[in-house]
Amino acid sequence: MYPDLASPVSARLMTAVQVAELLAVPKTRVWSMSRRGEIPTVRIGPREVRYRPEDIEAWIARRTTSRPRGTQP
């Protein structure tokens, strides 16, 4: 699923569509999260962003919890 990490940098970057597929959410949610700075991005132009697979993996790891939301530790 992830691009080959031995390939050039541009080939390693993921699109919002690829991130949305990975997270199983609509691409519009990924775009919104990107605009709000909630998910790490790489800006490649005034209106274009991409995502590094390792940044997305780390972001997922930081958000992973083993207890249900709203319960006390």
Image (tube, rainbow, N blue to C red):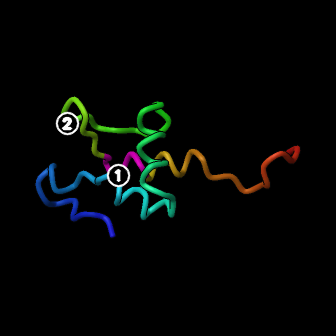
Callout 1: few (<14), some (14-19), or many (20+) C-alpha neighbours within 10 Å? many
* Residue wearing tag 1: 16
> Toward the viewer: 42 or 7?
42
Q: Identify which amino acid the numbered label 1 is placed on.
A: Ala
Q: Is residue 21 left or right of residue 61?
A: left
Residue lying farthest to the left in this orientation: 8
Split into 4 quadrants, where in the image is the C terminus? Answer: top right
Callout 2: few (<14), some (14-19), or many (20+) C-alpha neighbours within 10 Å? few
Image x and y of residue 45, in percent: 19, 33
Residue range of the region highlighted in magenta in the rendering: 51-56
* Residue lying at 78% horizontally and 54% vertically, measured from the top left: 67
> Toward the viewer: 54 or 38?
38
Residue lying farthest to the right in this orientation: 72
Question: Quarter of the image holding residue 68?
Answer: bottom right
Image x and y of residue 55, in percent: 39, 45
* Residue wearing tag 2: 44
Image x and y of residue 58, in percent: 46, 47
